[in-house]
Amino acid sequence: MEKKPDIQQFKGQYRLPKFAIPKRYDLVLKPDLSACTFSGSVQVDLSISQVTHFLVLNALDLQIHQASFTNSQNKKYCPCDVVLEADDEVLVLVFDEALPTGDGVLWISFSGVLNDHLVGFYRGTYVDGGVKKNMAATQFEPADARMCFPCWDEPALKATFKVTVEVPSELTALSNMPAIQETVNGHLKTVYFEESSTMSTYLVAVVVGLFDHIEDTTADGIKVRAYCPVGKADQGKFALDVAVKTLDMFTGYFSMPYPLPKLDMVAVPDFSGGAMENYGLIIFREIELLYDEMHSGAYRKQRLTIVVTHEVAHQWFGNLVTMEWWTHLWLNEGFATWISNLATDWLFPEWKIWTQFVQETTGGLRLDALEQSHPIEVEVHHARSVLEIFDAISYEKGSSVIRMLQSYLGDDVFQRSMSTYMKRYAGKNAKTDDLWSVLSEESGIQVNSMMDTWTKQKGYPLISVKSKDNTLELEQSQFLSSGSFGDGQWIVPISLCLGSYNTKKNFLLEGQVRTVDISELLYSSDSNSSSSKGNDQGKCKEHSWVKVNVEQTGFYRVKYDDKLAAQLRNAIEENCLSETDKFGVLDDTFALCEACQLSLSSLLSLMDAYRKEFDYILISRLIDVCYNVAHISSDAIPNSVNELKQFFINLLLFSAEKLGWEPVSGERHLNTMLRKEVLMALATFGHSETHKEAMRRFQAFLDDRNSPLLSADTKRAAYIAVMRNTSSTNRTGYESLLKVYRESDGVQEKEPILRSLASCSDPSIVFEVLNLLLSDEIRDQDSLYVLSGISLEAHETAWSWLKENWDLISNKSGSGMQLTWYIKNIVSRLSTQEEADEVEAFFASRMKPTFAMTLKQNIEKIRIKARWVESIKQEQSLPELIKGLACRV
């Protein structure tokens, strides 16, 4: 008697079996926008490599109606059993008669629900003539194509796709390729799209909605379109211009033309991320694609440029050449982040993007200093856990490590390598080692031996520098914010300069310790005139300071002995260092202070040296440090918080007085962004003059929404001042701001309001604001804006609210990334060991793969802050120092 086929062998497996490989999909989708459902069918051309009783593919939240397999001899096989395994997200088709090897076609009909969770094939809404209507869009990355149609939903299983959709005849239907035919049948039309190039399932896309569009053409004849809400096509012009120029630039950089006949960009009202790089059809949330001169500030213009260039870069890095598995996600995101900065700098060199890039590096350094961090190349064993590695490691650390390698190898070698890599793997999948091999071939350097230390282990080194006579001793150890000791060791590209940027030395630190003879540098600097990046060159005495990690191109932190640290502070005050290096000294000092390796007193004393600075990147980081120190001090030294805030105000008044509230005609882009940051900080810290002026301008804005007294770049500062002056007994400002939100039509007007609503110092008002997230008042995608602005005074209230409403929030958010927003923005603000224990206990029975790692990281952050609080309490002379700093003007 023949043994019955057993499907148990396929349970608990995180990769699909490889005995059937898809080559082509013919997909038909029929969304019903009224019922919020869809039906469809898919024909998959398969190549079966071994005789099998099973076909195993991915499916989730779908109903399977019929299925059959037809082999190359036209013999039809119908499954005897159809099993949907929800936990493993697979569909197993069981056949009594074994399927032979060779080619064949699998046919499946199915149906599903247009969900509200912004994943898979989902429902969005838009307003047409004052009426709220439904639309549909897809978001498949990383593993949600399976929620739309049964498929082999892994990046390495590339195929071609022929998509057909049936939609209401008045709506626009978009997919990866151009439409080649439309047939109208009453109120419905069927749109047939050209068959695609080879691509992964996560890049398939469909959008159905009502849009206006504008278009342009690249030098190679590629048609580029921007699809915008009806009546707002002009707001897509800036993004369209950026996309066209970037396509031309990348074609030259990679020596590889854009491989598709068109590129569409579409702004949808409901979208979980910032944008998604679907091949030939990039989907954006509206605020990331639409630019309105009156309501979009300087930061929004810069952000839009970076997002568009990032997604266009993915058409090569990610779409043309795709990572083999999610372990190598950083090949997509790290490179797209790095090269989007390259493109933005090419488009707008006056923005000094590479100076701003140190903010990317800082984001990676902060997350990678946690014991709960992960390597750039991280093992992924569950589809739902992939979302968690779309984080600062894959993006910021990934791009920073690429920049470090580019700096080490040189621009020409690096670009030549990228071109070779693209040509070799076009239309295929690649792993990290494949990239290292190409770089090694082109450079003649064994890149993999150096870079494996950066991608295959988590963390990074702290380089401790000590001076003695004519030598420097450099020692590396793993840096952890918790104060624990790690055993990581890296091959570190070291750069240092001595008293001058003309006196520089580069080498690899390959062991734990190295002693460097600097007598040659001392002699060299004596024979050169002083060279500083500042304006006060005469004050910079030769060989009076040492700066390691010049221009912050390396992904590591530096700790100097007391003598070297004092010399660096003098160099900062005498304006001897570049903005980037001043940033690095401040950033490293803050991190060392948080890890309890330096005192808060030493950090505050260093911050005082920055009071005459007037550089966006520096002041922006200084403000972030101020926010963090204010937060920790409210628990550690509550009696000194008001004086500490006065010190922070004093640090910022120099910039504030130079900038004022009114933009100057023709002023630098970075000055416009700096004004926004400085005024927001002064409003947050309670500067009375800022509050008074903000309230005056806000009232003028209420009287006339087109008032020039409140520009796009100063609105948020005014809104924060309004909310800081709001309380349960004085709700006027809050209610006025809500009224503005409700009456505003554009996302550019709504976003700064949402980011400001929870900044109130009265926890009861913040509680009320958070409840708005549970209503239909605020779109789910916009909850992030509100959560990111929760005030220092309301963090305990926010945690109580989260516990009380967790089940509702969890059901509302589904399996997408929104749950991580709540954890990152609420849990991370707690700061006692007891609260960390409470968080662990609360989530013990509520853990999900989508946020397990994020939760552990944020619990660790709480414990780091608790340790820091106890360390600060031991600084007996700290209150007196703060009092003195607060009195300095």
Image: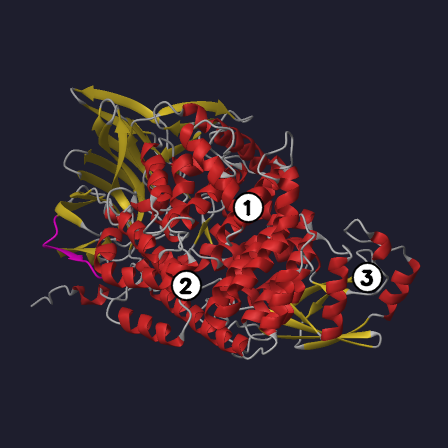
The disc labelled 3 sits on which kind of residue? Gly
Q: SS class of the residue under badge 3?
A: loop
The residue indicated by pointer 1 is: 689
Q: Is residue 442 left or right of residue 180?
A: right
Q: Is residue 807 above or below residue 565?
A: above
Q: Residue at x 48, y 23 (%)?
A: 216
Region in magenta: 78-88
The image shows residue 540 at horizontal and vertical percentages of: 83, 58
Of 169 and 146, the residue lying toward us: 169
**Lower sequence index among marks 2 and 1:** 1
Query: CA–CA distance between discs 2 and 3?
Result: 40 Å
Q: SS class of the residue under badge 2?
A: helix
Mark number for residue 499? 3
The residue indicated by pointer 2 is: 829
The image shows residue 93 at horizontal and vertical percentages of: 17, 54
The disc labelled 1 sits on which kind of residue? Glu
Residue 876 is at least partly visible in this image: yes
Q: Residue at x 36, y 32 (%)?
A: 744
Q: Is residue 40 left or right of residue 687?
A: left
Location of the C terminus by quadrant is bottom right
